[in-house]
Image: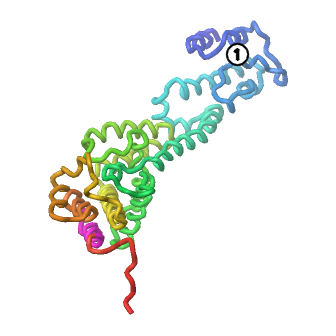
Amino acid sequence: MEKLLNFLKEQKLYKEEFFKFMEGKIKVFPYDADLSWFGCFPIVEDNILKDIRLLVPEIITEKNLLVNIHEYVHALELFEELGSVYEDRREEREKKASSYEKIYLNSKKPKQVVNYYVICNKLKNIIRTGWKSWNVKRDRLESVAEHIYGVQMLALAMKSEYKYDIDIMKVILMLAIHELGETAIGDLTMFQISKEEKEKIEHEAVSNILRGLLDGKEIGKLFFEFDEGKTKEAKFAYQCDKLEADLQCKLYGEENCVDLNDQKGNKVMNHPIVKELLDSGESWETMWLKFGQRVYPYDDNFKAVSNYAIENNISKKKEKSI
């Protein structure tokens, strides 16, 4: 008993009244008593341990009390004191959780869901940097969230028509989170930051975002797999990501949203390949489609789709000949 009390005092989790209670200086209240003195216990969350009877259902013996107190302290150690160490072991703790730990874990889950949703919701309001860089004139420009939707739909179509030997659901999940870091660092293009520098700050941001989720590690693996670009799913997803942007350029170009004479301060125009293509007379949208073919590792199928976009008006249906 004395050893436990000393341990609890070291943790500084309880008020002085708690130790008076444990040492018998405050009498043990019966189960149905008014427990207004519950303030001597730390309240973890509003829905947890509001009533001491949740902590100690039946205060009958000293052993019974010690068992319950131990469960509570153990839970607090894991959930409040260990921080990221606990989060790294969360799945393991879920399986081995005591009844008190399960109460705490279940109370956390709605908050984790909403927190993650709110973070991702930011992508709806982050406009793709490329459109701003090129001074695209349009009432409504594509957001990062819309790009994510577009690239997923492109992936489904490419898998459907070309029968790639890939796990398409893995690809869809990979693409769903491939821009997750932009909730923290914004939409940085290849013309603004090196790939290595972007990956460093983005990986740190993604790890922080996913830390609260039970499956955060598994979700993070998909994000890092996409960036590494070594698996067949990652290679396919990367091509979809780049071609989707090229196709969106084509759509904006067909709407005449870009004036190449209105590009003051646009440093991208000085990129060697961009400058070469524009100087040769290519339109803005065709320039980007050809840029993609030269810079990104498109396979023959992706090149075929890109070439189709170059050669055709993709935003309007052709009129039927009489």
Q: Main secondary structure of the magenta part?
A: helix
In-image side of 208 versus 94 (left or right): left
The answer to whether residue 171 is above or below residue 37 is below
Residue marked by disc 1: 40
Q: Quadrant of residue 198?
A: top left
Q: Residue furthest top?
A: 25
Q: Position of residue 170 (x, y in %)?
A: 41, 57
Residue nearer the viewer, 227 or 316: 316
Tag 1: amino acid: Cys
Q: Residue at x 33, y 37 (%)?
A: 201
Q: Quadrant of residue 26?
A: top right
Residue 299 belongs to the span the image colors magenta: yes
In-image side of 134 versus 117 (left or right): left
Please report the bounds of the magenta region as a residue range. 298-309
Q: Position of residue 173 (x, y in %)?
A: 43, 54
Q: Position of residue 82 (x, y in %)?
A: 49, 25
Q: Residue at x 35, y 48 (%)?
A: 129
Residue 313 belongs to the span the image colors magenta: no
In-image side of 231 versus 221 (left or right): left
> In the rendered image, which quarter contains the C terminus?
bottom left
Circle 1 Cα neighbour tier, 10 Å, few/some/many (<14 / 14–19 / ≥20): some
Disc 1 element:
helix
The answer to whether residue 49 is above or below residue 272 is above
Q: Position of residue 100 (x, y in %)?
A: 65, 31
The answer to whether residue 172 is above or below residue 126 is below
> In the rendered image, which quarter contains the N terminus?
top right
Q: Is residue 236 visible?
A: no
Residue nearer the viewer, 213 or 301: 301
The answer to whether residue 185 is above or below residue 241 is above
